[in-house]
Image: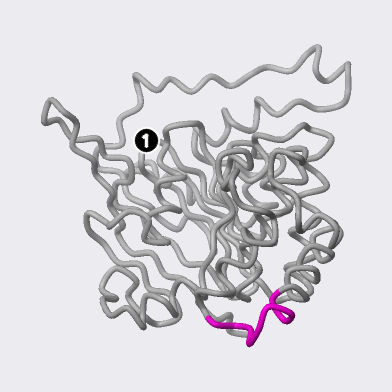
Amino acid sequence: MTREKLLEVRELKQHFKTDNKSVIKAVDGISFDIYRGETFGLVGESGCGKSTTGRTIIRLYNATSGDVIFNGTDVHRTKSKKELKAFNRQMQMIFQDPYASLNPRMTVKDIIAEGIEIHGLVKNDAEKTNRVHELLETVGLNKEHASRYPHEFSGGQRQRIGIARALAVDPEFIIADEPISALDVSIQAQVVNLLKELQEERGLTYLFIAHDLSMVKYISDRIAVMFAGKIVELADSDELYHNPLHAYTKSLLSAIPVPDPDYERNRKRIIFDKDQYDPTNSELREVKEGHWVLCTEEEYKQLIK
């Protein structure tokens, strides 16, 4: 069965100029596809460019160069207000910090209903109220929460409000930008399970951005590993986890704790030497079907043996 591409990213670059005129290559020529109905994980340490990638895809930043094709339309060449409005409804974002991403002066009802009003999805206030109540119940809250303010909720509850806000306009695609990193470990699994349930119920497609590779593996169908603005490895979730090929991916996996005292006692961390790493003459090459690694021609020959 042929899978349908919902999002195509081609040679995307996002460069920022600093005050001293130097250039930070936050995203430096990356390419990948996301298929309808899948969860595509984007993982890497802080500063690798993964959040910038998500924000550039959704047009919070204008791309330095490259293409983002969503549903057959080039996002960064969309100009008319009508086209932008349609795009903003199809693609939504769940932000990392549930404390900073909700307006403290707005009630939960107003926060969730903002997109509903902008896109004219209801005829009157009664319909709007009903829709907000439905969304709250969908994310595990109740309708009595609608009249409250963000400061009255825990971090996990606030993130559920953020999820309800993203769902309010019936998007096809959601970028979840480290949606659990600010939450207690006990709450993280609840939020991830909610996202999985919503995906099954609503046929959603996710770009799930995180630095925790074990959680990304749990939710993702395929994973791209990012380092210094480039994708260094991309493969199916199980394949990447059990057969990592790039040195940086191996170092990330070696850092994941295992609930086994004997294993942990003898575990050896693989250290990735960033100072010695030189990606010159490297490009993303397919070493086996669906498994891509950033490597030189010589490294590629070794990997396919």
Tell which of 178 and 25 is nearer to you. 178
> On screen, 138 above or below 74?
above
Apparent side of residue 44 relative to residue 254 in the rendered image (left or right)? left
- Location of residue 106 with respect to 8 vertically, above or below: above
**Viewer-side residue, 259 vs 183:** 183
Q: Position of residue 31 (x, y in %)?
A: 38, 59
Tell me where residue 125 appears, x and y as whole percent. Answer: 68, 78
Bin the neighbour count of mark 1 within 10 Å (Cα to Cα): few under 14, some 14-19, many 20 and up: some
| Residue 124 forms part of the magenta stretch | yes
> Residue flagged by tag 1: what amino acid is it?
Ala
Give the quarter of the image for residue 32: bottom left
- 194 within the magenta span: no
Left or right of 104? Residue 191 is: right
Is 287 left or right of 151, judged from the image as shown? Answer: left
**Residue 57: x, y in percent?**
40, 60
Identify the residue at horizontal 70%, vertical 54% (top origin).
161
Q: Residue at x 51, y 52 (%)?
A: 234
Q: Residue at x 28, y 57 (%)?
A: 62
Residue 189, above or below 60: above
> Image height check: is 231 above or below 175?
above
Number of numbered tags placed on the structure image: 1
Quadrant containing the N terminus is bottom right
Residue segment shown in magenta = 120-128
Q: Residue at x 88, y 23 (%)?
A: 260
Q: Which residue is mark 1?
A: 228
Give residue 169's quadrant in the image.
Answer: bottom right
| Along the line of sight, the residue nearer the viewer: 181 or 130 | 130
Which residue ends up furthest to the top in the rendered image? 265
Helix, strand or loop at label 1? It is loop
For the residue pair 296 and 204, the one nearer the viewer reads as 204
